[in-house]
Amino acid sequence: MRDAIFVLLEKRNPLPTDDASKAKCLDGVAKRLEELLFKMALRQRRNT
C-alpha cells in the first residue's frame, strides 16, 4: 500500500533532492494517509 502511495506522491509533489530527506518525507505522508484510510474504513463499517 505504501509503495502505491509513494508513486502517486512522487508524480504530484516535488520532493527533496537527497534520498534521506525524500524517504523521510514520503514515509511520514504515507503513514498518515494509511491511518486515515483505516479510520475511514472503520467508520463506514460501523455505519452499515
Image (cartoon, rainbow, N blue to C red):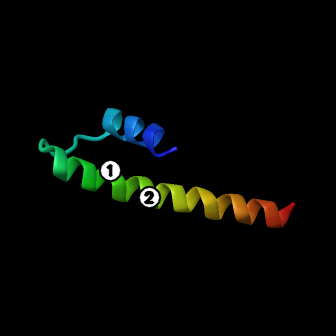
Amino acid carrying label 1: it is Leu
- Residue position marked by numbered label 1 in the rendering: 26
Residue 7, quarter of picture: top left
Q: Position of residue 37 (x, y in %)?
A: 59, 56
User: Badge 1: how crowded within 10 Å, few (<14), some, or many (20+)?
Assistant: many
Q: Position of residue 20 (x, y in %)?
A: 17, 50
On-image quarter of the C terminus: bottom right
Question: In the depicted view, which residue is nearer to us: 12 or 19?
Answer: 19
- Residue position marked by numbered label 2 in the rendering: 31
**What residue occupies the far right of the structure in this picture?**
48
Secondary element under disc 1, as helix, strand or loop, is helix
Q: Is residue 18 left or right of residue 8?
A: left
Cβ–Cβ under 8 Å for marks 2 and 1: no
Q: Residue at x 45, y 61 (%)?
A: 32
Q: Residue at x 22, y 47 (%)?
A: 22
Q: Is residue 33 left or right of residue 23?
A: right
Residue 3, quarter of picture: top left
Secondary element under disc 2, as helix, strand or loop, is helix
Structural distance between the alpha carbons of marks 2 and 1: 8 Å
Q: Position of residue 40 (x, y in %)?
A: 65, 60
User: Badge 2: how crowded within 10 Å, few (<14), some, or many (20+)?
Assistant: some
Eyeballing the image, is 43 above or below 22? below
**First-in-chain label (2 vs 1):** 1
Q: Residue at x 55, y 61 (%)?
A: 36
Amino acid carrying label 2: it is Lys
Residue 18, quarter of picture: top left
Eyeballing the image, is 34 above or below 17? below
